[in-house]
Image (cartoon, rainbow, N blue to C red):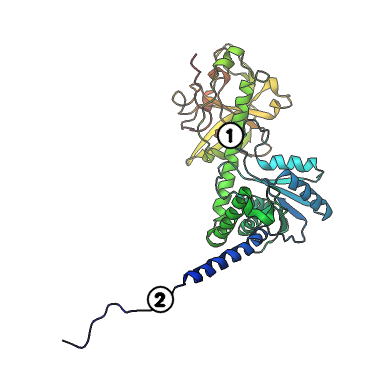
Amino acid sequence: MSKFKIRLFRKRTLRRPTLLGWLVIITSLIVLCRISLPFMYNFLAVNKPIKSKTMIIEGWVPTYALKEAVELYKEDGYKRLIVTGVPIVNYEFISPYQNTAQATILALKHYGIKDSIYHANIPTNVFVDRTYHTAVAAKLLFDSNNWPMNFNIFSVGVHARRSRLMFRKAFGNDCEIGIYAPRDRTFLPQYWWKSSKGFRNVSNEFVATLFVTLFFHPEYNSSVDKINTGRYEDRIYYKRRDKYLNFTDPATSRLNKEERDSFSGFNYYDPDINYRVRAGFKVDTSIAVFGMKTNTERTPEYRTYGFIDFTINDTSYRLSAFQNIAFKDHPVYGKELFVPFKDLTNSSTTYVTGRYIDIPIPVSDSIIIDFNMAYNPYCAYYDRWSCPLVPFENHLDISIPVGEMIYKKKEK
């Protein structure tokens, strides 16, 4: 037998605590945790303002804290006030506001702010990382106005540290950022772990702050694109909502009771920013006034005001813009031009005789024409209306798959 043995393992002494040792370790950890608990709130609710003339108030701040913000604004001689905001999505059908910034601004004015208040709100297409996106919205304000890159954020409680981190990621290290963190009155900060609200807020913010510090690396330009696109889409959605309310409200609707009872709402394509195009505009009023044909014997007088030249998918098109003579001096309608058009979607997904767009009378040789704003004539809903027919010159040999679609009446 050989004296040598092949060994795959070797023995090693492993020391482990005794029962008393485990008791000492666990007790020490509990004592350490108990001692550190009050400091967690103070760590998160950082309060380090700087000297600045600009204050940014987070739009979710509760009313009791807004009073303190107003006092600070006046006492410290601030010159500029910005409020961030997120869309109101829980009570949007009864709220007169589109976002929390609008509501907060009204409260600030009620409490005595007489200066201009700027809002940095985010659109409804932003569902995650909303604090960061409000910071990006604020950065866009600073860039467009060339304001000095320093400000104080007014937050509340344990949200403060994470808010400052998010603004730092949006504004960069060259910006000086201070923070106010008045006490959160919904729980006792020194005993936050004794209430469900306090435990939830502090523990959630601690984990979220740790995540932001270590792993959150957003792409600023993509956030800017998302905000700009979302704001554009929101403007369209809000206009569509207002149109629906006007049609269904007896005080503003042009529909009679029977028509309102059978009204089923409008159908739309989703907004597409690619059909919001910059176009050239050439004024030409040399063509004589004419009677525009309608679906009835009525022939309202219009004149050609000018021509819109634009490009879609590398193909050039032209539309004529008309002025209604009867409304030429009207304080509202007299400032607009009428652009009826037909395209290849008519009779399939859009109204068979065409759709309309209204544009402001241009003040230069360049305009924006937005086909997302295309709407149906009234005769698309009910036969009793008289509507202009689209002149042949405004027939487009292209599909315009945006704007209002075919109306479908409610079945009785």
Answer above or below: position of 44 versus 258: below
Looking at this rendering, what residue extends furthest in the bottom direction? 3
Q: Secondary structure at mark 2?
A: loop
- Decide if residue 322 is on the left or right side of residue 311: right
- Report the side of 226 relative to 67 (left or right): left
Q: Residue 160: percent from the left, percent from the top?
A: 66, 55
Q: Nearer the viewer, residue 48 or 406?
A: 48
Identify the residue at image location x=20%, y=88%: 3
Please name which of the two marks, 1 or 2, marks the residue nearer to the observer.
2
Give how far across and how far down residue 111 sits, in percent. Answer: 80, 43
Q: Earlier in the sequence, mark 1 or mark 2?
A: 2
Query: Three-letter amino acid code at disc 2?
Result: Leu
Depth check: 400 or 229 in front?
229
Q: Which residue is pictured at 66% across the width and 62% down the height?
A: 39
Task: State left or right for residue 284 relative to residue 11.
Answer: right
Q: Residue at x 71, y 27 (%)?
A: 332
Q: Is residue 325 above or below residue 166?
A: above
Q: At which x and y percent is residue 396?
A: 49, 30
Q: Can you see residue 280?
A: no
Residue at (53% x, 19% y) in the render: 380
Mark 1–mark 2 Cα distance, whole angstroms, equals 68 Å
Q: Does residue 273 sit above or below 287 in this rendering?
A: below
Outermost residue, left side: 1
Quick check: can you spot residue 328?
Answer: yes
Q: Is the residue marked by circle 1 packed among few (<14), some (14-19), or many (20+) residues within 10 Å?
A: some
Question: Viewer-proximal residue, 92 or 148?
Answer: 92
Residue, disc 2 = 14
Q: Give the amino acid type for the residue marked by disc 1 in the picture.
A: Tyr
Tell which of 340 and 105 is nearer to you.
105
**Given the current orientation, which residue lies at the most extreme front position?**
20
**Residue designated by label 1:** 237
